Amino acid sequence: MLLEAKNISKTYRARRSSDTVQAVKDATLRARPGEFVAIVGESGSGKSTLARILLDLIPASSGSVELDGKPITTLKRAGRTHYRSVVQAVLQDPAGSLNPRKRVERTIGEVLRLHRIARSTSEVRAKVIEVLEQVGMSPAEPFLDRYPHELSGGQRQRVLIARAIALNPKIVVADEAVSALDASVKAGVLQVMADLKERRGVGYVFITHDLPLVKKVADYVYVMKSGEIVEHGPTESIFSAPAHPYTQTLLAAAPVLRAPKRN
Amino acid sequence: MIEPENASATPALLEVAGLQVFLPTGQDSEIEAVRHVGLVVRDGERIGIVGESGSGKSVTGRAISGLLPTSPKVRVNGSIRFAGREMVGAPSSEWDAIRRERVGMIFQDPLTFLNPTMRIGRQVAESIPSARVDGDKRARLAEVHRFLSRAGLENAEQVANSFPHELSGGMRQRVLIAIAIAKLPALILADEPTTALDATVQQRVLRTLDETVAEMRTAMILISHDLAVVAGMTDRVYVMYGGRIVEEGTTEQVLEDPQHPYTQALLRSVHSITEPDTPLYSIPASLRRELNSEVDRAS
């Protein structure tokens, strides 16, 4: 399977004038199951807009998103539903992506029913437990009856990942999915994601501004600036020999833990 | 650094001892969010408080600035002394005076701090003590521009005429720095001042904060979950877990030779792009369980 964004552009019209803003300019990228692709860049670089286009949440102004060579805009209803199960989203704000009035079991169980992966109550429950344990919430039973506010930030993010993988996706598009978490919790969630890549061949389009993480987990990196992909390549070469000045700036600004040498 | 211990009888700028903060969690339940915290800040000294979310670092910061929610269910025990003056139990007018004259505050989200309907210039002006400009409008305006420039905002006049929503995140954070320093405070309390910013912007804003605080010889408490931020900006650091300070020392000591297992684990979980290819590290659940019982036992 191959997910491709081909020459994607997205133009927004400014609210009070005829000016236009090009949020994404002619971006092309590829993602495959079993591969960890990262998009890095600062806020306003267009990386989240590109993610939304990949997820079929907003249309591109030009260019196309293609699954195995087939543009998703040409898909019929059943095709789109299929697309939305093989390409799953994990978004930044776990509190905002979870319904505060639904317990964990229902949050995950609903999508299982919707996509007809499990039907009976006992089937659904078994599957919910299975995916929760896959994201490291084990034993899973005590979490089933919890509401989002009864979970920690890391746990909420894991529930979102569990919900995404419950549909057996081939690719997960994760937009700043761990940015709000503490360093250690972040590492824990990423270990789960990397593990799912190894064990189940899940691929990722991982959007972040956290370069140390990218260096640890990504196979391939796209660097975005002002809507354009200015550089892309295997993770090693991006970090060892960044070609674009912007990539060099980003690397120079990456936080390094250094003991103070003052005075 | 020479420790001015017993150097004179003048009290420290800020002395916190046995601080406990209880926050309500439900009808009849509460948690001890801050447990017997003690810390000292001397004139011109920069200290860091680091910890993960839920460690009690921000609640400590709020207690120190008298900004805990005013509810009979929020209980504070212990002692917070500004230049020897006890503030626990002090009337809110005294806290107002402290915040007006002595403590400049910088928070993570400038939009909740800034008034959306008021131009930036006026908000900075409000922070300048009227005695200093003698009610002279023009002098006040000159001061506003001076502090905005000092906070690294190049086009001070234009910024002064702007509303908060017209500025970028980095500029808003600089406005908070300008407001904080305009009162020539003895202490700046910065709680996650750059967490919401991009790395390149964060770097520049931190440098500005670093330089201004150094120039003005202001003491600073920098609260952050980000060890890298605290490392570059502080002389001493306190590490918090579960409402308690688990380790303190000079920033160098704590980073180079951490004693507490939690500090060691926390440092290990911070990755950088320059380190050799070590695997991702997250603090094991078993260590957290041990820590939880340790902080509970100590109560």
Image: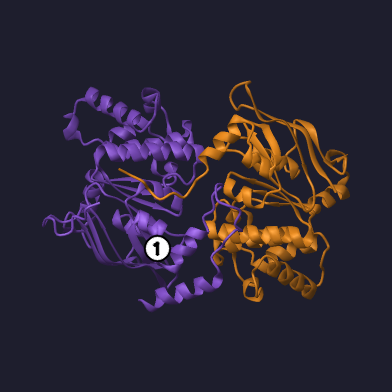
Q: Which residue is situated farthest in the left direction here?
A: B9
- Local crowd at mark 1 within 10 Å, few (<14), some, or many (≥20)? many
**Relative to A255, is B276 on the left or the right?**
right
Give the residue at x 18% y 59%.
Answer: B5
Report the amino acid beneath label 1: Met
Q: Quick check: B88 left or right of B163?
A: left
Viewer can see residue A4: yes
- Residue B67 horizontal/vertical position (percent): 32, 54
Q: Write down which chain is painted orange.
A: A
In screen coordinates, is A94 left or right of A127?
left
Residue B74: quarter of image? bottom left
* Chain depicted in purple: B
Name the residue furthest bottom.
Answer: B297
Q: Nearer the viewer, residue B188 or B267?
A: B267
Quadrant position of residue B236:
bottom left
Which residue is nearer to you in this view: A55 or B299? B299
Q: Secondary structure at mark 1?
A: strand
Residue B233 is situated, as x and y percent measured from the top left of the image, at 37, 46
State the image coordinates of residue A252 (x, y, percent, origin top left): 52, 38
Report whether residue B198 is seen: no
| Up-down relation of residue A250 to residue A103 (above or below) | above
Q: The disc numbered 1 marks a residue on which chain? A: B
Q: How many marks?
A: 1
Task: Give the position of the C terminus of chain A as an image quadrant.
Answer: top left
Please identify the quarter of the rendering in which residue B70 is found.
bottom left
Point out residue A159 in the picture as x, y percentages from the top left corner: 65, 62
Residue with the most extreme top position = A18
Q: Which residue is mark 1?
A: B240
Left or right, B122 with reference to A114: left
Q: Residue at x 79, y 64 (%)?
A: A113
| Coloring basis for residues | by chain
